[in-house]
């Protein structure tokens, strides 16, 4: 039976409101099992409580993290076998085990298939190609690594990958990380023979990413496994395998939170001792500390960016709001020995930013910081759109709008600073595109307000302009660019269909902009099923416009 509270009763004690209302700063009546605001908004599945009236999804996630942490500890300390071991299965392994039937050149045939099956039917251990082939793979990968969410030191990774030691040696990267890098080396190759071999490396990376990786004794196994999950998620999103992409980014988030990467209060302490969770050794250098900080912000950016793109809620929202890890610096700063910015810093990094309590945006902030802030604002705009159905969001919307305008001011001031797909850190182009997407989401497209529609048009045209700036020589782009382009194109098409007053030169200008954006995005469809699909859909709509 539900235990409803009177709407005229006294205010709830702290912690008694449901998670949905607390996150959106809505007045909750505390009714069980579904509070009044959630019932009126017809979102009973989002109404959850974290007290003792039953386990919420948030508690389920925390329990999952604790179980994963216990499993890692068990694998690191194999004193006695567990009576009920946790089995981490790879639900996608079977669909990737097929080998290519294409004939490979003699140089390729000299390399045993990395995805060959053993007698038991399981994938055989990864077999490495010759050193010169590894070097080619690394070159192919690092041309696009930053677009794929690579947060480790590129120099240190390449040096360790080429060391003359066997797989599994602690001086080299984790085997599953090498497998996914070799996959991208094949996938991004212009050689059809190596492209045909890419599925084998992908199968090995998927099979080992979250099982044998964590079972190893590699000192960087947690950080490297997070990197594997991020790289796989980016590829799977690009391939149009969206559910699998969300699975892998959720795994990366769980590993980040479980290993304490979201609560690095004092980065300098990691140089004196390991992490408080025990999953990381003492950092050998400020750069190693920086890798851990960047791992959290890259993972958070992907989680929030894709949740906003799909317009879905993320189980990670409450955890992200409690982030204590400082904003990431440019990689060069960590190399110089610097660990934190001189800018004022809120105790809770993300919540302080969303509340406007973290000072002004820094014009010297790293591209990753700016991209993370843009992704947070895009996700926040989605939450506000949902909340608008049950409450007056004008004050919160105005605050979020102000933060977005401030961010765009910084990003526009840095035009030309990294205006390329290969910019240091996360591309400033991507950050600017996401910020414009947040602005579009904050404005009600169904409003007849001409000023609002004009702002939507301007932001949509800005996103299309960003797409046209992407280097046409690039074989692969961040798949979020596809989602941004789709949002901008559909927003303009929607306005053209709903506002008959837009005619003549103004209408032609918008149609030409949509078509130019379509041509620009179509260049990247050969390596991305997601892009190919979205281009086809927009082309169909445009033909009927």
Image: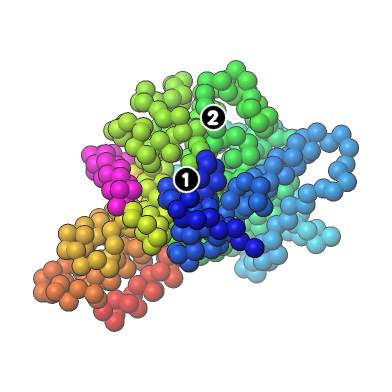
Residue drawn where x is 48% and y is 60% of the image = 36
The secondary structure type at the circle numbered 2 is loop
Residue drawn where x is 45% and y is 64% of the image = 40
243 w.r.t. 539: above or below: above
Q: Which residue is mark 2?
A: 264
Residue drawn where x is 79% and y is 38% of the image = 74
Q: How is the image coloured?
A: rainbow
Q: Which residue is mark 1?
A: 11
x then y, percent, for residue 257:
59, 40
Q: Quadrant of residue 292?
A: top right
Depth check: give the residue in front, 120 or 449: 449
Q: Quadrant of residue 460?
A: bottom left
State the separation of the CA atoms marked 1 and 2.
Answer: 34 Å
Residue 125 visible in image: yes
Depth check: give the residue in front, 108 or 60: 60
Q: Residues within 10 Å of mark 1 (few under 14, many from 20)?
A: few
Residue drawn where x is 62% and y is 42% of the image = 255
405 w.r.t. 269: above or below: below
Q: Which residues are magenta?
A: 394-422
Quadrant including the N terminus: bottom right
Residue 424 visible in image: no
x then y, percent, for residue 265:
52, 27
Labels 1 and 2: the sequence-earlier one: 1
The secondary structure type at the circle numbered 1 is loop
The residue lying furthest to the bottom in this view is 544
């Amino acid at each position: 039976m539900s235990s409803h509270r009177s709407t005229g009763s006294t205010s709830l004690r702290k912690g008694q409101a449901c998670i949905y209302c607390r996150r959106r700063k809505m007045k909750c009546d505390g009714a069980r099992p579904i509070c009044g605001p959630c019932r009126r908004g017809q979102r009973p599945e989002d109404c959850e409580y974290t007290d003792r009236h039953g386990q919420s999804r948030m508690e389920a996630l925390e329990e999952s993290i604790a179980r994963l942490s216990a499993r890692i500890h068990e694998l690191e300390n194999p004193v006695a076998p567990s009576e009920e071991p946790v089995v981490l299965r790879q639900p996608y392994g079977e669909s990737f085990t097929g080998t290519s039937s294409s004939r490979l050149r003699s140089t390729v045939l000299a390399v045993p298939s990395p995805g060959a099956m053993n007698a038991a039917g399981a994938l055989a251990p990864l077999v490495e190609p010759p050193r010169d082939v590894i070097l080619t793979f690394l070159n192919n990968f690092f041309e696009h690594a930053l677009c794929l969410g690579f947060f480790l030191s590129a120099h240190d990774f390449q040096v360790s990958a080429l060391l003359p030691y066997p797989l599994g040696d602690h001086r080299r990267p984790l085997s599953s990380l090498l497998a996914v890098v070799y996959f991208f080396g094949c996938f991004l190759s212009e050689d059809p023979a190596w492209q045909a071999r890419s599925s084998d490396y992908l199968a090995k990376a998927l099979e080992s990413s979250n099982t044998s990786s964590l079972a190893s004794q590699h000192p960087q196994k947690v950080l490297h496994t997070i990197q594997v999950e991020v790289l796989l998620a980016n590829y799977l999103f690009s391939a149009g395998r969206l559910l699998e992409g969300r699975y892998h980014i959720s795994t990366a988030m769980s590993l980040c939170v479980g290993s304490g990467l979201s609560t690095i209060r004092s980065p300098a302490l990691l140089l004196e001792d390991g992490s408080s969770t025990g999953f990381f050794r003492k950092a050998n250098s400020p750069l190693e500390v920086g890798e851990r900080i960047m791992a959290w912000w890259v993972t958070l950016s992907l989680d929030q960016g894709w949740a906003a793109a799909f317009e879905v809620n993320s189980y990670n929202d409450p955890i992200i709001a409690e982030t204590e890890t400082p904003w990431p610096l440019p990689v060069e700063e960590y190399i110089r020995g610097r660990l934190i910015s001189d800018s004022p810093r809120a105790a809770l990094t993300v919540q302080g930013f969303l509340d406007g309590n973290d000072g002004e945006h820094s014009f010297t902030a790293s591209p990753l910081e700016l991209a993370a802030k843009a992704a947070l604002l895009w996700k926040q705009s989605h939450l506000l759109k949902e909340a608008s159905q049950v409450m007056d969001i004008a004050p919160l919307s105005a605050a979020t709008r102000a933060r977005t305008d401030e961010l765009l001011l910084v990003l526009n001031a840095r035009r030309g600073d990294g205006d390329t797909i290969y910019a240091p850190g996360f591309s400033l182009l991507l950050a600017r595109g996401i910020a414009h997407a947040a602005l579009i989401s904050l404005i009600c497209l169904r409003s007849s307000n001409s000023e609002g529609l004009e702002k939507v048009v301007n932001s949509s045209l800005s996103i299309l302009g960003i797409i046209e700036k992407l280097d046409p020589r690039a074989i692969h782009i961040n798949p979020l660019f596809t989602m941004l382009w789709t949002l901008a194109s559909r927003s303009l098409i929607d306005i053209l269909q709903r506002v008959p007053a837009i005619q003549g030169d103004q209408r032609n200008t918008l149609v030409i902009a949509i078509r130019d954006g379509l041509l620009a995005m179509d260049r990247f469809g050969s390596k991305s099923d997601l892009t190919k699909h979205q281009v086809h859909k927009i082309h169909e709509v445009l033909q009927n416009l």
